[in-house]
């Protein structure tokens, strides 16, 4: 093999961190979108309740 054991270990660590970071960023994007829609629905309900008073 052309790489040493420590180099392969370093590459694997970088690979794992990159994959976890990518998946985490997509999860954050999805959760942010869901949170925005929940907030919009909550605001709509609040406006309806305050309008009735």
Image (cartoon, grey):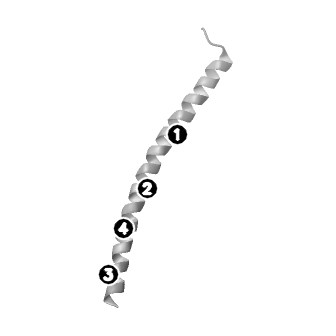
Contact, mark 3 vs mark 1 (Cβ under 8 Å): no
- Of marks 3 and 1, which one's residue comes earlier in the chain? 1
- Residue on which disc 2 sits: 32
- Residue on which disc 1 sits: 21
Q: Give the Cα distance between marks 2 and 4.
A: 12 Å
Q: How many marks?
A: 4
- Residue on which disc 4 sits: 40
Q: Give the Cα distance between marks 1 and 4.
A: 28 Å
Residue 10: which quarter of the image?
A: top right
Helix, strand or loop status at disc 2:
helix
- Residue on which disc 3 sits: 48
The residue positioned 38% from the left and 72% from the top of the image is 42
Residue 52, horizontal then vertical, whole percent: 31, 88
The residue positioned 59% from the left and 24% from the top of the image is 11
Contact, mark 1 vs mark 2 (Cβ under 8 Å): no
Q: Residues within 10 Å of mark 3 (few under 14, many from 20)?
A: few
Contact, mark 1 vs mark 4 (Cβ under 8 Å): no
The residue positioned 42% from the left and 61% from the top of the image is 35
The residue positioned 35% from the left and 79% from the top of the image is 47
- Of marks 1 and 2, which one's residue comes earlier in the chain? 1
Residue 8: which quarter of the image?
A: top right
Q: Residues within 10 Å of mark 4 (few under 14, many from 20)?
A: few
- Of marks 2 and 4, which one's residue comes earlier in the chain? 2
Helix, strand or loop status at disc 1:
helix
Contact, mark 4 vs mark 3 (Cβ under 8 Å): no
Q: Nearer the viewer, residue 6 or 44?
A: 44
- Of marks 4 and 3, which one's residue comes earlier in the chain? 4
Q: Give the Cα distance between marks 3 and 2.
A: 24 Å
């Amino acid at each position: 093999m052309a790489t040493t054991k420590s180099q392969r270990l370093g590459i694997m660590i970088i690979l794992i961190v990159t994959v976890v970071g990518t998946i985490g960023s997509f999860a954050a994007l999805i959760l942010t979108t869901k949170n925005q829609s929940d907030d919009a629905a909550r605001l709509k309900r609040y406006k309806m309740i305050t309008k009735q008073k």
